[in-house]
Amino acid sequence: MPQQFTLPILLILFAGGFMAGFVDSIAGGGGIISLPILLSVGLPPHFALGTNKFQSSFGSLMASINYYRGGLVQVKKLGWGIIFTAIGATIGTLAIQQLSQELLQYLIPVLLLIVFFIVLISKNLGMKDEEGKLNPNLFFLIFGLLLGFYDGFFGPGTGNFWMLAFVFLLGFNLRKATAHTKWVNFTSNIVSLIFFAIGGKILIIPGLAMAAGQLSGAFLGSKLVLRSGARFIRAFFLVVTAATIIRLIYTTFIQ
């Protein structure tokens, strides 16, 4: 770990945070940018994970606020989703200290590949609101616990899974799914952040440098979603999902 964070390092962290915040606010997957950057400047893995949750929470909050102000989210209807996601993230963050990630490291690239091809083949998926296939309360019970746990335990691709679940099972269009995804993502980020903070695994100076970039990137990205159509989000989602798959395959099977 560097003894001090020089101006060039802080600028790299800011730029990385900006790119991660921009990408994450539109299609999720910002962690494939931010986490490698934190590791590249010399942070040990456990400090990189904790600091990453710290800085990403700023971007998630900014995007969530923008989507709320833009009328894409009714927070009252997300209450059970936030509660169950928080419970799942708590269990997942505690479990990661006891269990191995090996199975997930091999399984998640495969699941993301399935998500990628579903979206690629279904060209009209999420272009407009449709009738939901699952009761919202049951949906949030199942996916709040499941994806909240996953984000606390491992993380990569959480936003991708949330977006597809919102589109397929609640019938949301992609703009609406993106907005709701950021709220539940922010919930699991904050819960994980609390436990990393308790464990003393957060570095404030590099975290704040990235957080400044995250705020800027998330602000611009979420504004772009509010002004763009579902086809733009679909294309961006496919690119980010593909990049996440490549990154996970490289780190799991090649590196």
Image (tube, rainbow, N blue to C red):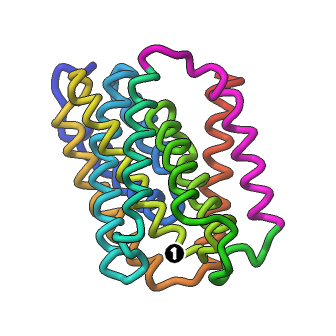
Q: Residue furthest right?
A: 121
109 falls in the magenta region: yes
Q: Is residue 126 above or below residue 36?
A: below
User: Residue 243's spot in the image, x, y percent?
Assistant: 63, 48
User: Residue 230's spot in the image, x, y percent?
Assistant: 61, 79
Q: Is residue 59 above or below residue 67?
A: above
User: Residue 17's spot in the image, x, y percent?
Assistant: 34, 50
Report which quarter residue 236 is drawn in: bottom right
Q: Amino acid at mark 1?
A: Lys
Q: Is residue 190 above or below residue 231?
A: above
Characterize the magenta stretch by its predominant secondary structure: helix
Q: Residue at x 48, y 30 (%)?
A: 153
Total marks in image: 1
Report which quarter residue 128 is drawn in: bottom right
Residue 97 left/right relative to 32: left
Most foreground residue, 12 or 239: 239
Circle 1 crowding by C-alpha within 10 Å: few under 14, some 14–19, many from 20: many
Q: Residue at x 21, y 25 (%)?
A: 198
Q: Residue at x 62, y 19 (%)?
A: 102
Q: Residue at x 21, y 22 (%)?
A: 200
| Element type at mark 1 | helix
Q: Is residue 31 above or below residue 68?
A: above
User: The N terminus lies in which quarter of the figure?
Assistant: top left
User: Residue 92's spot in the image, x, y percent?
Assistant: 45, 31
Residue 193 left/right relative to 16: left
Report which quarter residue 5 is drawn in: top left
Circle 1 sits on which residue? 176
Task: Report the span colored magenta.
Answer: 97-121
181 falls in the magenta region: no
Residue 8 left/right relative to 236: left
